[in-house]
Image: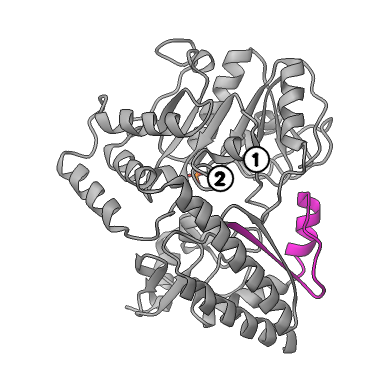
Amino acid sequence: MTGNASWFARALEVIPGGVDSPVRSFASVGGQPVTIASGTGATLTDVEGTVYLDYVQSYGASLLGHANPAVVRAVADAAALGSTFGAPTPGEVLLAETMCRLVPGLEQVRFVSSGTEAVMSALRVARGFTGRDRIVKFDGCYHGHADSVLVAGGSGVAQLGLPGSAGVPNGAVADTVVAPYNTVPILDDQVAAVIVEAVAANMNLVLPAPGFLEGLRAECDRVGALLIFDEVITGFRLSLGGAAEVFGVQPDLWTFGKVIGGGLPIGAFGGRREVLSCLAPLGPVYQAGTLSGNPLATAAGRTVLEAVTPEDLRRLGTRAQEFGRELESAIRSGGLGATVVAAGPLLGLYLAAENPVAPTTYAEARVICSNGYYPRFFHEMLERKINLAPGAYEVIFPSLAHSDDDFAATVTAAAAASRAVATS
Ligand SMILES: *Cc1c(COP(=O)(O)O)cnc(C)c1O
């Protein structure tokens, strides 16, 4: 019982679907996932010893690459001092100070243990602060799996939310309104908050149209609603200041996760001091967590944020975009249509018979991502030891550990994979 097949068979027995998060399953691409034994830098090694170039990087939780030596050391050092106390620690203060220094307008943060929790807490703060119930989210944006934001793509701001998952009562989403991405909804004075991925990176990659984020800011200000940027993916990745810095639009609240834990479980929400003062113990909005601000996670996160310079991220962005252009032309040369969209170092790959037009909404993204090309391309790449996400709606995460040779090898594999799909 040592190979991929046997590990996954055992997983299926004791873990529903064999996975602890549905995105890891191969449900949308067919087949079965490999089981990972270890990772280092840009690569993963499965339990059979096969090495893959990894563009998932734990869906963006890893920015420096796997098992970065400085992060490993920081976690080991922190663990040796005790892993959780239920009391304030220097580590959480240092990470909070670092984040507030880097993100323009971010005055305070509170740590939690996942992005989902960060979003739940930010929404509660927004509701508590404004005394209003309604939340506006955008079709195709993912904000974790809390009831109120797990809403099926609806269209039109007037439309009441419908459950996007069994087990979510209608009441939990009655105050969630879904609007199409890249259209500024008309709000009223019942709206507590508008939550948005400033760059949408969970419906493949969809860029904010010029004026969209500015329009949201102005519309929120007009009715006294709070603007929440969910920067769980974009934070400390698009730039050290995140999307707010890149686009020059400041939200009232932010949510963070992924990068800020350096590969350990963490989330954070933050914003202006005035808004966060409504949180217990200062105010009436309750929010808590036994493992919140965990010393291992904050040590790992701080090591990452202190290791990365603004120039590192600018260079990674430039290199990733060059890689994206080469990937696009390699796939086109192999016979498939392809369009690669980029935001900083994030890449979105769209495949079709003819080169698709970059989508601006979830509805447009869905037409391309459901055309059946991605699953075939994914498997051809995996056979060539390139690990893309097993789903057409995920983005490509080049890390600081990916070398130019890694990118070149990926481009070569992509040309061959495209040819294999186009001729089959
Ligand atoms: C991943 C993600 C979340 C949820 O974070 P978890 O740590 O998986 O709970 C929330 N928002 C966005 C934009 C994300 O990409």
Which residue: 70% across, 47% down? 140
Q: Quadrant of the C terminus?
A: bottom right
In the rendered view, tell whether residue 321 sits above or below residue 375: above
Which residue: 74% across, 84% down? 422
Contact, mark 1 vs mark 2 (Cβ under 8 Å):
yes
Q: Nearer the viewer, residue 319 or 334?
A: 319
Residue 160 at x, y = what percent? 79, 32
Residue 46 position by quadrant: bottom left
Q: Is residue 396 something one can see in this rendering? A: no
Q: Quadrant of the N terminus?
A: bottom left
In magenta segment, residue 200? no
Q: Amino acid at mark 1?
A: Ala
- Which range is magenta? 346-371
In the rendered view, tell whether residue 364 sits above or below residue 382: above
In magenta segment, residue 363? yes
Residue, disc 1 = 198
Q: Is mark 1 within 8 Å of ligand 1?
A: no
Mark 1: which secondary structure? loop
Which residue: 79% across, 41% down? 180
